[in-house]
Amino acid sequence: MRPRRSLLRGVAAVAAGGTLTGLFGTGSASAPAPNALYDTDLAAGADTTIAARVDPALRARVGLPPPAERHWANFRERHPSLDAAQFGPVSASVAVEAGRIVGGCAIADGAFDGETLKTELVARGAEQFGDTPTAGGGGFERFTHAPSSCAAAVGGSRVVLGYGRGVDEALAHVDASIERGAYRSPGSVADESAAELTGDAVSYATLGGETRSRLLDRLDGSSGVEAVVRDAEALGVALSVGNRRSHVQYGVAADPGALSARELWDLTTQVSGREESLDIESVSRHGRMIVVEAAVETADLWSAHERVIGSIAE
């Protein structure tokens, strides 16, 4: 089992847009369900949780931002038995406190060699922990690695990696992700975010007080984004990649009395006006969620967002 920091970077790379494949691979890998996002808050509460789901074809089509690409390369080097071309849907979620990842889980489906992976885990110091005890998780063999507070489960066409503040918490994440229906609390901000944001890649973050303060500290005070960060319960983004242009959704979960769709329209059009390749198309409210629909040149996808972020941050 790999060291703690390596696991966290691997999970973070998946959450940031990394995938376990450049192509869909063989037929046993199915497309991710629209709302198949695991929320770490189900197993361990935290100031902030970040969740993501990635279509594996995305990396082959548009690549990854350099930091995520480096983390993905490190992950592949440490786990050669996880053949990237054999994996389908990937999802991940991490819990964040004081700017540090304190727990998380990554889930991948594909046509990998399960026995080889189990042998590799044991060779890296993992201990077999027995099958999953849940009714919906039969057939998964679990492994733990106490020094790194990590756990893993391998079964059928799925592999699950968990991390926590101890192996018990890591196993709790693994078991919650395997148990049927244990993905999000119905009616929660995470549930609404996952329901309204759809695409090849989807990611959202619930904002706790400490994370909110850190974000506000990084803003330059003149962009107007501060008001959104102060009022938002969660922020999200979804991406659908096209050959020439790509569709982007930005989501903000906020009380209707604190932030209106009109206010968000005014702000997003102001910010996007600094970036010619990014066009705001519409803004609409769905319960607590306000969704901004936008389009961007596919070739300029990552660089356009880097420029926008740079224009509103210090």
Image: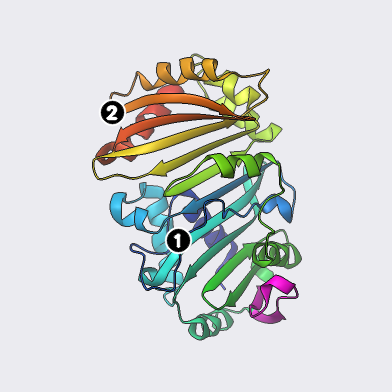
Q: How is the image coloured?
A: rainbow
Residue drawn at point x = 59 percent, y = 66 percent: 161
Q: CA distance from mark 1 to mark 2?
A: 30 Å
- Identify the mark nearer the N-term, 1 or 2: 1
**Residue designated by label 2:** 277
Name the amino acid type tagged 2.
Answer: Ser
| Element on which disc 2 rests | loop
Camera-side residue of 50 and 298: 298
Residue 63 x/y as whole percent: 32, 51
Tell me if mark 2 has few (under 14), some (14-19) or many (20+) residues whose alpha carbon lies within 10 angstroms of its own: some
Residue 45 x/y as whole percent: 75, 48
Tell me where residue 311 sits by quadrant. Answer: top left
Tell me if mark 1 has few (under 14), some (14-19) or many (20+) residues whose alpha carbon lies within 10 angstroms of its own: some
Q: Is residue 313 visible?
A: no
Camera-side residue of 154 and 135: 135
Residue 125 x/y as whole percent: 60, 79
Q: Is residue 58 visible?
A: yes
Tell me where residue 18 sits by quadrant. Answer: bottom left
Tell me where residue 270 sits by quadrant. Answer: top left
Q: Which mark is residue 153?
A: none
**Residue designated by label 1:** 31
What residue range appears in magenta?
A: 127-145
Residue drawn at point x = 53 percent, y = 33 percent: 251
Residue 93 x/y as whole percent: 59, 53
Residue 226 as seen in the image, left or right of residue 188: left
Residue 8 versus residue 50 in the image, above or below: below
